[in-house]
Amino acid sequence: MVAMGIFLLGAGLGIWALQHNRLGNFNIQPRLKEQCRLITTGIYGYIRHPMYSSVILMMLGIWWGSQTLLESILLGLLIVVLYLKAQKEESLWLCHDEAYEAYKQKTKLFIPFVL
């Protein structure tokens, strides 16, 4: 039951993010698209990388249901990869839009009001 709740929380977070950012704006590689603009509405007003938070929560929910050593390692690796990707994207935004520094000061990386 807890696992499903965590998974659904992650899915809901992803849906909320998609309501404020187009699906076509997401990339596997950390790079900015032409004509990109900073999104600061909805969940983006609280955290800078809600889709990463969504994926982490959904995978945490899956992990919670079984908690094998392999899944624990893979979850840890996923978190590291998404953290590194977020850092790269933020460096690109800082070079692209001077408003990004102020946005960073107002928001958290992955968890509203915490981290």
Image: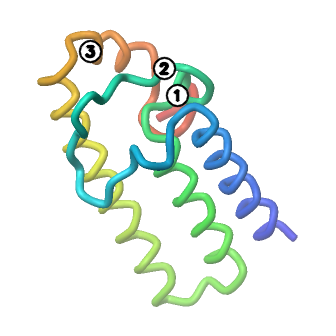
Callout in the foreground (3, 2): 2
Task: Find the distance from the CA under tag 1 to the CA under tag 2.
Answer: 5 Å
Q: Which mark is residue 40?
A: 2
> Observer-nearest residue: 56 or 31?
31
User: Which quarter of the figure has residue 74?
Assistant: bottom left
Helix, strand or loop for disc 3: helix
Q: Could you say whether the residue bearing mark 2 is in a helix, strand or loop?
A: loop
Q: Which residue is mark 1?
A: 44
Observer-side mark, 1 or 3, equals 1
Q: Position of residue 42 (x, y in %)?
A: 62, 25
Asked if disc 1 and disc 2 are in contact, CB closer than 8 Å, the reply is yes
**Residue farthest to the left?**
95
Q: Which mark is residue 110?
A: none
Q: Amino acid at mark 2?
A: Thr
Q: Nearer the viewer, residue 109 or 99?
A: 99
Tag 1 near tag 3, CB within 8 Å: no
